């Protein structure tokens, strides 16, 4: 009697390519949990991927290991980052991520390397810039028209390999109040793999809580400009446990999402988790994020490990 074994293949992504790729953004648990609203108050490694001008507003020296996962998009991200804003007035950060989405379908994979520098022009204003190298590969013969350059990848890997940059500014007119503005992929690559966007926000942080609202305009991914609105908040309990929640509306996907997260912050390390789920969407998507951080300077952990207790405490 002859038997044959069939290879089991996982189902492809149930989301759209744009939804699974999510502008190619890299988000840590705090960003995910607060709905993406971190362009005004997100410092440390968060600033590397959002607004580099925020780096000088918290004195930190952090190492971070980061992982994200989306079951619907079949998306995974792995990587790490380092941020140093305590050694000198010129703050810096470096990070690298490897990501993939829909491995049994489009098989899009990308490597994202970033180097950020920021400098405070005064106590009330800071500017920053991030250099980005992005390399994207994608399978062939999986598009709507088979082996077609129009709908698929190319046989000459990669489909995208280019340097671009972000630039931002943050203004703090009064203690605890922050306005941030940042442009992403400002070389205008002209592709949704590295869309040109403009994001801004206002945030307020004081003692044990933070609130922030953000808006983003995407000029590349869709036929016309599409926007996002993001709102989030954080409450620190007992000096060690941050509780976070947020909301995001994506005009391109016409999706409403709720998010939440928590963590534990010690003198030398922290572990944090965050999650986001689309509650109204044609193709609901869930994203989970986890990070582990190590604080080289224990003083940087006295106020929650980073920006968690307020950027106005510049000596923490």
Image (tube, rainbow, N blue to C red):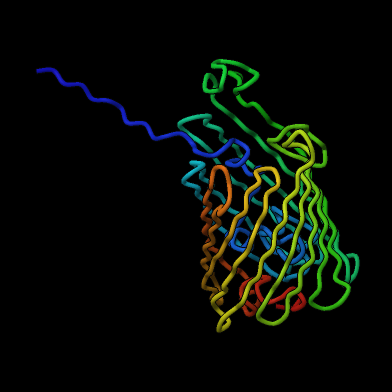
Picture coordinates of residue 257, whole percent (x, y): 60, 55
Q: In which quarter of the image is residue 207?
A: bottom right
Relative horizontal placement of residue 240, taking residue 212 as reference (left or right): left
Relative horizontal placement of residue 80, taking residue 36 as reference (left or right): left
Total labels drawn: 0
Q: In which quarter of the image is the C terminus?
A: bottom right
Is residue 250 placed above or below 265 in the rendered structure? above
Relative horizontal placement of residue 79, taking residue 310 as reference (left or right): left
Picture coordinates of residue 139, whole percent (x, y): 54, 25
Q: Quadrant of residue 147?
A: top right
Viewer-closest of 203 and 88: 203
Residue at 79% over, 66% down = 202
Residue at 46% over, 46% down = 71
Q: In which quarter of the image is residue 109?
A: top right
Q: In which quarter of the image is the N terminus?
A: top left
Picture coordinates of residue 212, whole percent (x, y): 73, 67
Viewer-closest of 254 and 209: 254
Residue at 71% over, 64% down = 43
């Amino acid at each position: 009697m002859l038997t044959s074994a069939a290879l089991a293949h996982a189902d492809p992504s149930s989301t759209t390519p744009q939804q699974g790729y999510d502008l190619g953004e890299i988000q840590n648990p705090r960003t995910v949990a607060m709905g993406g609203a971190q362009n005004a108050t997100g410092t440390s490694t968060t600033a590397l991927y959002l607004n580099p001008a925020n780096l000088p507003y918290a004195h930190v020296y952090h190492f971070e290991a980061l992982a994200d996962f989306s079951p619907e998009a079949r998306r995974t991200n792995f990587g790490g980052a380092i941020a140093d804003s305590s050694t000198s007035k010129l703050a810096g950060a470096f990070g690298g991520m490897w990501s993939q989405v829909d491995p049994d379908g489009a098989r899009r994979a990308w490597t994202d390397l970033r180097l950020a520098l920021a400098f405070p022009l005064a106590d009330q204003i800071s500017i920053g810039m991030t250099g980005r190298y992005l390399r994207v590969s994608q399978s062939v013969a999986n598009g709507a028209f088979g082996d077609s350059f129009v709908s698929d990848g190319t046989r000459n890997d990669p489909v995208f390999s280019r340097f671009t940059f972000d630039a931002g500014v943050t203004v703090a007119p009064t203690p605890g109040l922050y306005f941030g503005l940042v442009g992403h992929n400002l070389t205008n690559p002209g592709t949704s793999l590295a869309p040109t966007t403009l994001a801004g926000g206002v945030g307020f942080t004081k003692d044990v809580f933070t609130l922030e609202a953000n808006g983003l305009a995407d000029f590349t991914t869709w036929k016309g400009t599409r926007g996002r609105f993001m709102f989030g908040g954080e409450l620190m309990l007992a000096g060690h446990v941050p509780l976070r929640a947020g909301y995001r509306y994506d005009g391109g996907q016409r999706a409403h999402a709720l998010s939440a997260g928590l963590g534990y912050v010690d003198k030398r390390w922290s572990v944090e988790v965050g999650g986001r789920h689309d509650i109204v969407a044609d193709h609901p998507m869930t994203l989970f994020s986890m990070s582990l951080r190590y604080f080289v300077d224990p003083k940087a952990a006295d106020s929650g490990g980073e920006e968690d207790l307020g950027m106005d405490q510049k000596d923490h």
